[in-house]
Image (cartoon, rainbow, N blue to C red):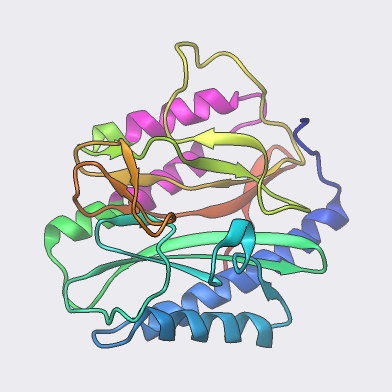
């Protein structure tokens, strides 16, 4: 399947969907505190998205039961909101998707609950820094595999490893489109595969493990953890390449 090249009016629609994601993440991050439950955060997020005129696109997607992925501590991605109440020192990933007028938005952050350890602060910072490093590394003509390789080297350079088996992706009229963008090089040659072109819109989302990047899916069929059983972190933005530069769509 071809990687879509978006026209300016399509990019504007994607910008609107992603702005709602960004506003919702900002809103929810202010609500995160010890004692609040994951289900409460999800309900707040779904309600806020709807008040802004969009639909929480994760709800029902591939059977996922909620509008907000709430991933606590060792759960790196796809955590299902539950009755669990956050505790001081927890690490929480929030991943949100929206659909507005048939166009999709997607972004994620990881935040600390109350006071967290310096080790966890560094873990979270790695995901955020890897994301912005990746965005800054993009240029027209770069191959997506080269971008994956650069992300992997950055994560390894910080002393962590990328989660394997999950990836960034294209986005547009569907929440997940071509290309797949792992946070590590698949194969041996980064100088292969499709090139980045003006008009492409895609999501970058570094997923950070501490020691082992092998993924394990828990019994709920959704929550993804590292086989090392340690805390992880996750950050994501939707970006567009336009006029030979990169713009982040998922910002407030």
Residue 206, quarter of the rendered image = top left
Say above or below: 38 vs 63.
below
**x and y percent of residue 134 in the render?**
47, 40
Left or right of 246 on screen, residue 30: left
Say above or below: 78 vs 152.
below
**Quarter of the rendering occupied by the N terminus:** top right
Residue 195, quarter of the rendered image = top right
**x and y percent of residue 194 in the render?**
67, 23
Residue at 35 percent across and 55 percent down: it is 219
The part of the chain drawn in magenta is: 126-154
In the image shown, does 251 or 45 lie closer to the viewer?
A: 45
Q: Main secondary structure of the magenta part?
A: helix
Residue at 59 percent across and 35 percent down: it is 180
Left or right of 54 on screen, residue 143: left
Say above or below: 20 vs 151.
below
* Count of numbered labels shown in the rendering: 0
**x and y percent of residue 7 in the render?**
86, 47
Residue 73 within the magenta-colored segment of the rendering:
no
**x and y percent of residue 249 in the render?**
64, 58
**Quarter of the rendering occupied by the C terminus:** bottom right
């Amino acid at each position: 399947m071809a990687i879509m090249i978006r026209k300016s009016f399509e990019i504007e629609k994607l910008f609107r969907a992603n702005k709602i994601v960004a506003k919702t993440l900002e809103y929810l991050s202010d609500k995160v505190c010890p004692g609040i439950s994951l289900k409460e955060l999800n309900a707040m997020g779904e309600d806020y998205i709807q008040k802004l005129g969009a639909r929480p696109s994760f709800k029902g997607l591939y059977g996922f039961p909620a509008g907000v992925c709430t991933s606590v501590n060792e759960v790196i991605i796809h955590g299902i909101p539950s009755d669990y109440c956050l505790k001081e020192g927890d690490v929480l990933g929030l991943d949100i998707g929206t659909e507005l007028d048939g166009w999709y938005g997607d972004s994620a952050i990881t935040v600390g609950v109350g006071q967290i350890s310096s080790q966890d602060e560094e873990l979270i910072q790695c995901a955020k820094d890897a994301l912005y490093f990746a965005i800054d590394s993009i240029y027209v003509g770069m191959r997506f595999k080269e971008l994956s390789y650069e992300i992997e080297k950055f994560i390894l350079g910080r002393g962590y490893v990328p989660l394997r088996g999950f990836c960034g992706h294209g986005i547009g009229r569907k929440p997940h489109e071509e290309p797949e963008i792992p946070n590590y090089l698949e194969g041996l040659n980064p100088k292969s595969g499709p090139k980045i072109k003006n008009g492409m819109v895609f999501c970058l989302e570094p997923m950070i493990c501490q020691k082992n990047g092998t993924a394990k899916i828990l019994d709920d069929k959704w929550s993804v953890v590292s086989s090392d059983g340690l805390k992880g972190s996750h950050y994501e933005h939707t970006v567009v390449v336009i006029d030979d530069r990169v713009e982040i769509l998922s910002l407030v």
